[in-house]
Image (cartoon, helix red, strand yellow):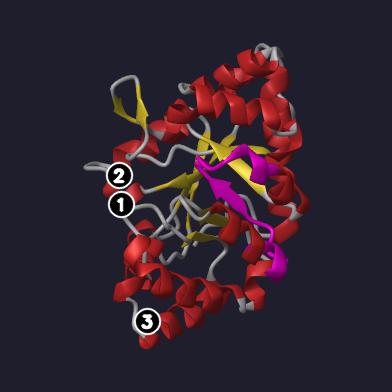
Amino acid sequence: MTAPSAQTAPDTILLDTHCHLTEYDDAINVLRQASEASVHVVAVTEDPGQYRILRTKLGRREGVTCAIGMHPLHAHTFSPAEIARFLRLLPHASWVGEIGLDFSPAGRDTRRQQLRVFDAILTDPHLNSVPVTVHSRGAEQETITRLADAQVTAVLHWYTGPLKFIDDALAANLWFSINPAMVATTKGRALLNRLPRNRVLLETDGPFARHQRRSSQPKDLLWVAGQIAAIWDLPIPQTIAFIQANQERLIAAGKPAMPRRE
C-alpha cells in the first residue's frame, strides 16, 4: 500500500483488525460496504467450530480474512479436545483472534479456566508468525505479562485498562487498536494521547461497539481516522499514512498476505 494524498484519502485501504462479522444480520452487505470504502476486514471468531464454518462460508472472497479464536468468556465451555482442535487448526490460520483474558464481573468466576486456555495457546510457536488480536478487559496486567513472557507480538483490542500498564505493553512490542466508541470517550482519547503513533491500528469490534447510535461497521474506519487526526493535530492524509505504515509493519512481523484469502 502507498501513502494516500489529500485527494485519494477516501480511496485508501484501511484494515479493520477486529470485527465480529458473524454477529451482523447481513454480513455480506457489511463486507460489500467495507469494500466500497476500501476497508479490509479481519473477521474474528470465538471458537474453532465458528472459525471453520465462517471460513467455509467466506471461501475465496476478497477483502476479508478469517481469524481463529477462543473467546475468554467461553473458556469454561472449552474441553481439552476443543483446545486440541484449536491447536490443530492454528498452523493453517493466517490470523489469530479473539483470544485473551477477561476478569471483569462477566468473567471473574472463570478465571482459572481462562488462564488454562490462554496459557495453552501461548505455548504454540505459530503465534510468532501471524498477527494476533487479544482481549484483556479487567486482566490487563496478566494479559500483557503473559504475552511478554511468550514473546508474542499482538494487538490489544479495545483497551480499557489503566494507562499505567501502557509502558509495559509497549516494551512487550504490543499494539493498540482503536474503534469508533473509543474516540468518543475521554478515556479513549487519553489512551491515544499516551500512545506513540507507530503503535496505533484500527478496529470496529462491530457490531458490539457503537457509532452514532448504531452498530459500528468496517466502513466507519475513515471516520475513526479523522477523529484520530484531530486528536493528533495532523491532516487526515498524514494520519492515514501513519496507520497504513503500522498495518504494513504488523503484517510484515507475521508475514501473511494482506489480507490473505482463505
* Residue farthest toward the right in the current orientation of the protein: 171
Q: Type of residue at label 1?
A: Thr
The tag earlier along the polypeptide, 1 or 2, is: 1
Label 1 secondary element: helix
The 10 Å Cα crowd at callout 3, few under 14, some 14 to 19, many 20 or more, is some
Say above or below: 231 vs 50: above
Disc 3 and disc 2: Cα gap in Å?
A: 26 Å
Q: Which residue is drawn at 46% across and 35% down?
A: 35
The 10 Å Cα crowd at callout 1, few under 14, some 14 to 19, many 20 or more, is some
**Residue 12 in view:** no
The magenta stretch is 147-166
Say above or below: 69 vs 238: below
Where residue 79 appears, as percent x and y from the top left, is: 34, 83
Residue on which disc 1 sits: 22
Q: Which residue is drawn at 65% across and 62% down?
A: 145
Q: Disc 1 or disc 3, which is closer to the eye? A: 3
Q: Nearer the viewer, residue 120 or 190?
A: 190
Residue on which disc 3 sits: 82
Disc 1 and disc 2: Cα gap in Å?
A: 7 Å
Label 2 secondary element: helix
> How many numbered circles does the render carry?
3
Q: Residue at x 64, y 74 (%)?
A: 126
Q: Type of residue at label 3?
A: Glu
Disc 1 and disc 3: Cα gap in Å?
A: 20 Å
Where residue 18 appears, as percent x and y from the top left, is: 48, 46
Where residue 6 appears, as percent x and y from the top left, is: 68, 12
Q: In which quarter of the image is the N terminus?
A: top right
**Residue 178 in view:** yes
Specify whether 32 is left or right of 184: left
The 10 Å Cα crowd at callout 2, few under 14, some 14 to 19, many 20 or more, is few
Q: Type of residue at label 2?
A: Ala
Specify whether 217 is left or right of 27: right
